[in-house]
Amino acid sequence: MLVDVQHNPLIGLKGYRAKILHFAKATTSPKDDYCYFEDGLLVTRDGKVIFTGDYKNNINQYDKLDIQDYSGKLLLPGFIDSHMHFPQTEMLASFGEQLLDWLTDYTFPTENKFADYTYARAMADVFLRQLYRHGTTSAMVYSSVHKCAADALFEAAQKHNMLLMAGKVCMDRNCPDWLQDSPQTAQRDSAELIKTWHGKDRLHYVITPRFAPTSSEAQLAVLGELAQQYPSVFIQSHLSENHNEIAWVKSLYPKHKHYLDVYDHFGLVRQGAVFGHAIHLEKDEWQCLAERGASIAFCPTSNLFLGSGLFNLAQAEQHNIPVMLATDVGGGTSFSMLKTLGEAYKVCQLRGNQLDPMHGLYLMTQGAAVGLGLEQQIGNLNPGSDADFVILDPLFDELTELRFKHHNSPQDLIFALSILGDDRATVATYIAGKPVYQAARQHN
Ligand code: GUN
Ligand code: FE
């Protein structure tokens, strides 16, 4: 039977009833500028949001709408994790070392396994499953040095129509020779990956020099040329994470003013460039990031776990540098952006600042999207945005049932979830309007 879609406006529409919370606009006061519907309605069609608002006042215009009832649960835009390492999924919680020894002892041997496409493809599925069960729907990801592992990750993400940003790591020195590329192969493989994946469906390529110590000047130069050739690709690297790392960069690049200047010299600091950590910056480095319009990924669980230091969020914001929250799996200790927010709160406490929960939520949704220039697609529930969202149950166990009995302002829900919650709170995760995760446990 033929169905006349034009004369049946309900075809393909799907509604969701829940407490709905998001940030509709870019803001410097997320504490006040959020949109909250205690009894809300989200309507989607063809993978896009078409309506977000109050349920009772708007349900009439959607007679016979197919509604998924999540009343009492919290519906948020899917989380954005702006810095993580796909091949480190299996090495979370590796004991005892700070950054440089941790890379040598654990990271490089693990990443070597990703030379095998079949292995990488299977791990890509594990990695994406972990993201989805934690409510993360978009991420900016480092793959390994091997081109085939990046192909495997993009293929896996494409299957779910996910907005994924990822890149093949480039490193041609100061790491085991069995894990090195060269300036020529880094350029060739990155260019081929850009041609294959960048702009295909919802996928984006990220030029990915691992960090200054593992790239020669020749390699940074070709990656800078590639960035110029493809202005719409993202760039990611590590910056000023650990004191020994910084001293090493100074000895390897003695002519440069500071760590960031190494990247800047090769044209790798610009809008769409995301630098992980940025903990121990000099005054000029803050200014350079601000002038170039680059962003910072704040990775609190990693910074505490590797003993790297306390990121200065207040200073970054004084400089108007976009900051996004990130797990940095596997230097980070959890795939959960909720837990990451809780640890960001503690890092700010140690610096004498309070991180408001709405501010923290902004840094993993709309604020991250704005920093990436993707706020027309992700990070919010505005009509026209992609229907990427997560349903959380704030009352997911005996303790949280007690905790929330009498306090449930949206701030309080987000704060307590950030301290007590993790994937146990996730009821379902949707990407482009389709469920990619549904909890086995019944949430009442
Ligand atoms: N610096 C260079 N590589 C890495 C990495 O894999 N993780 C972290 N946290 N820092 C790095
Ligand atoms: Fe990292």
Image (spheres, rainbow, N blue to C red):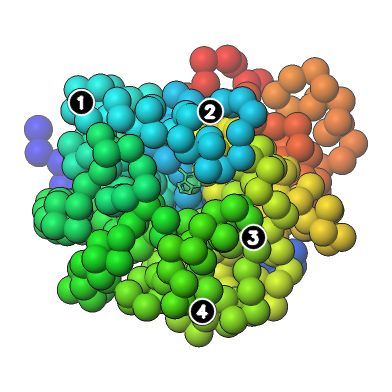
Q: Tell me the residue that label 4 is attached to.
A: 257
Measured Cα–Cα span from mark 4 to mark 1: 40 Å
Image location (x, y in percent) of residue 402: 87, 25
Residue 188 visible in the picture: yes
Measured Cα–Cα span from mark 4 to mark 2: 35 Å
1 and 3 marks in contact (CB < 8 Å):
no
Give the mark nearer the N terminus: 4 vs 2.
Answer: 2
Left or right of residue 192, residue 83 in this image: right
Left or right of residue 154, residue 28 in this image: right
Give the mark nearer the N terminus: 3 vs 2.
Answer: 2
Where 378 sits versus 119, above or below?
below
Image location (x, y in percent) of residue 177: 27, 39
Give the mark nearer the N terminus: 1 vs 2.
Answer: 2
Under circle 2, the secondary element is loop
As shown in the figure, which amino acid type bears the numbered disc 3?
Ile
Mark carried by residue 92: 2
* Closer to viewer: mark 4 or mark 2: 4
Under circle 3, the secondary element is loop
* Closer to viewer: mark 4 or mark 3: 4
Mark carried by residue 116: 1
**Circle 2: is it few (<14), some (14-19), or many (20+) Cα within 10 Å?**
some
Residue 150 visible in the picture: no
**Circle 4: is it few (<14), some (14-19), or many (20+) Cα within 10 Å?**
few
Residue shown at 71% from the left, 72% from the top: 315
Mark carried by residue 279: 3
State which quarter of the image contains the N terminus. Answer: top left
As shown in the figure, which amino acid type bears the numbered disc 1?
Asp
Measured Cα–Cα span from mark 4 to mark 3: 17 Å
As shown in the figure, which amino acid type bears the numbered disc 4?
Lys
